[in-house]
Image: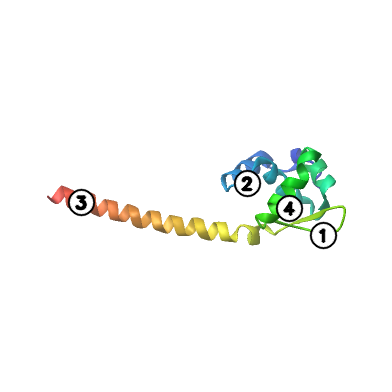
Amino acid sequence: MIKRPNDIPNYLELVSNLEEFGLSKYESMAYITLVSRGTLGASEVAYYSNLPRTKIYTTLKKLERKKLSTISSQKPMIATATPPSEAFGEIITLQERRLVSMRSILSSLKKLREEDKKS
């Protein structure tokens, strides 16, 4: 069983990649911990992700607002990661739309350049 961040293959790369999609470093670390370990209490998330306990509640609430986790209403706080395919489906769709748009812009710019050369 995966215990700590150093035990997760490509951990730093995963954190960096999630930051590129708008997560903070702490959010990335907490999300990876929840995905790799399953449902955990807040203090367990802090422990396994090496996050300060003083920041874990805020971090988990931010993940919930971003629909990357769910938090139980019971005390102590229990968090579960939203499955990655579900959590990032909307982001992937948005990026795919941006890619299509960029290709369209590129095509238009190429046409402008070709028309300019003909003049």
Q: Residue at x 69, y 46 (%)?
A: 27
Q: Crowding near pointer 4: few (<14 within 10 Å), some, many (20+)?
A: some
| Inter-mark Cα distance, 2 to 4 | 15 Å
Residue ID for mark 2: 23
List x then y, in percent, for residue 82: 70, 59
List x then y, in percent, for residue 117: 16, 48
Q: Residue at x 29, y 55 (%)?
A: 108
| Inter-mark Cα distance, 2 to 1 | 24 Å
The amino acid pointed to by label 4 is Val
CB under 8 Å between discs 2 and 4? no
- Residue 86 badge: none
Above or below 15: residue 85:
below
Q: Earlier in the sequence, mark 2 or mark 1?
A: 2
Number of marks drawn: 4
Q: Residue furthest left?
A: 119
- Mark 4: secondary structure: helix
Residue ID for mark 4: 35
Q: Crowding near pointer 1: few (<14 within 10 Å), some, many (20+)?
A: few
**Nearer to us in this view, 52 or 11:** 52
Q: Which residue is drawn at 61% across and 57% down?
A: 88
Front label number (2 vs 4): 2
Residue ID for mark 1: 73
Front label number (2 vs 1): 1
